[in-house]
Amino acid sequence: MNMKRLSIISFLLLTAIALSAQTPQQLRQYLPQIEGSTIAEEIEIFGRDNLYERINGAAPLFLENNFQEMTSMVYNFGEEYITIQAYRHATPEDAFGMYASERSSEMAHYPIGGEAQGDEYGLYFFSGCVYVKITSSAEGEQFSAAMQEIGKTLADKIDPEAGYPAVIKSFPAEEQIPYSAAYITRNYIGHEFLKPVYTANYETDGRKFQVFVADGKTQDGAKQILTDYFAFTRQTEPFAEGRLLIKDRYNGNIPAVWKGRYIVGAFDETGKDFGEGIYELLGKVALFH
């Protein structure tokens, strides 16, 4: 292997490590100086075993999304303050999944990190393996501007190329409901074997439904997911790559397409059947092209 190629590989490895393993001290160093404030010297750190001490009932969902460590930092503005909680997860997909699980339709969106939302008292975004929650004790232009400056600086330092996972980007954009994409680590539609799963919501002709991609990691992994699913539905006929119809007695008929490591399907929470046209939409997922 020539030195130039070795240098490129080394750079890529170092970049990957940097994006996934920012230490609490590094995160604090990333914080920008904000006029009229001071950054507290103290950093609070919480792990998987004591996260509940800070966020109580919300901790289990973070753990499901492969939470690793939370760093809490504070800006002081006299009697007011801004708190930053940076939740490091095992992968960028996990950080995105945690962010998406707390997404609110009542908040505005901002071009920060992979996606950001916020209101007068908070700003929330994901970047790399980190999900960041910034909250203010007071509202007003000063605090809103400060939260956005902090968020933009942190997001760019953690991962300047942050965005949706590649699988989510492969979903067809036509008729997709904005800001509906999500990542589920386990128990999609109540089935332990359906994991991990990427989803996005769609609306066509007044009907809302969800498109999902289950990632088996390998072709054999995808086959095992389907084997478990067909065992659950008691469908005994053999199946192969291509179009499938899974007769789920709890979730209605699930049209799906299997190719390689991926299973793409559609789910309607009302249980209403899909027409044959749904397969055309499923076939547009770019993973298949």
Image: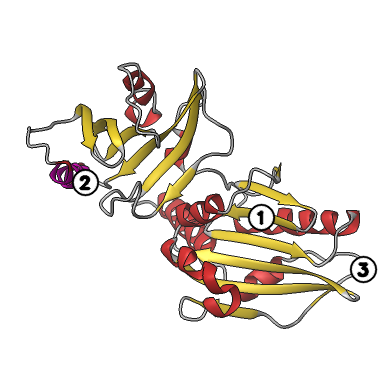
| Circle on res. 178 | none
Give the camera-side residue of 26 and 182.
Answer: 182
At label 3, counting other C-alpha atoms closer than 10 Å, the crowd grade (few under 14, some 14-19, many 20 or more) is few
Left or right side of 227 for 250? right
Under circle 3, the secondary element is: loop
Could you tell me which residue is drawn at 44 percent across and 32 percent down? 170
Q: CA distance from mark 2 to mark 3?
A: 55 Å
Left or right side of 163 for 271? left
Q: Is residue 184 magenta?
A: no
Q: CA distance from mark 3 to mark 1?
A: 23 Å
Could you tell me which residue is drawn at 48 percent across and 34 percent down? 201
Magenta residues? 222-232
Comes first in the chain, label 2 or label 3: 3
Could you tell me which residue is drawn at 69 percent across and 45 percent down? 106
Look at mark 3 in the image and give the residue it sits on: 36
At label 2, counting other C-alpha atoms closer than 10 Å, the crowd grade (few under 14, some 14-19, many 20 or more) is some
Look at mark 1 in the image and give the residue it sits on: 124
Q: Nearer the viewer, mark 2 or mark 3?
A: 2
Q: Is residue 224 magenta?
A: yes
Dominant SS of magenta comes to helix
Q: Name the image quarter holding the C terminus.
A: top left
Comes first in the chain, label 3 or label 1: 3
Left or right side of 232 for 144? right
Kind of residue at badge 1: Tyr
Under circle 1, the secondary element is: strand
| Circle on res. 225 | 2
Position above or below: 281 against 9: above
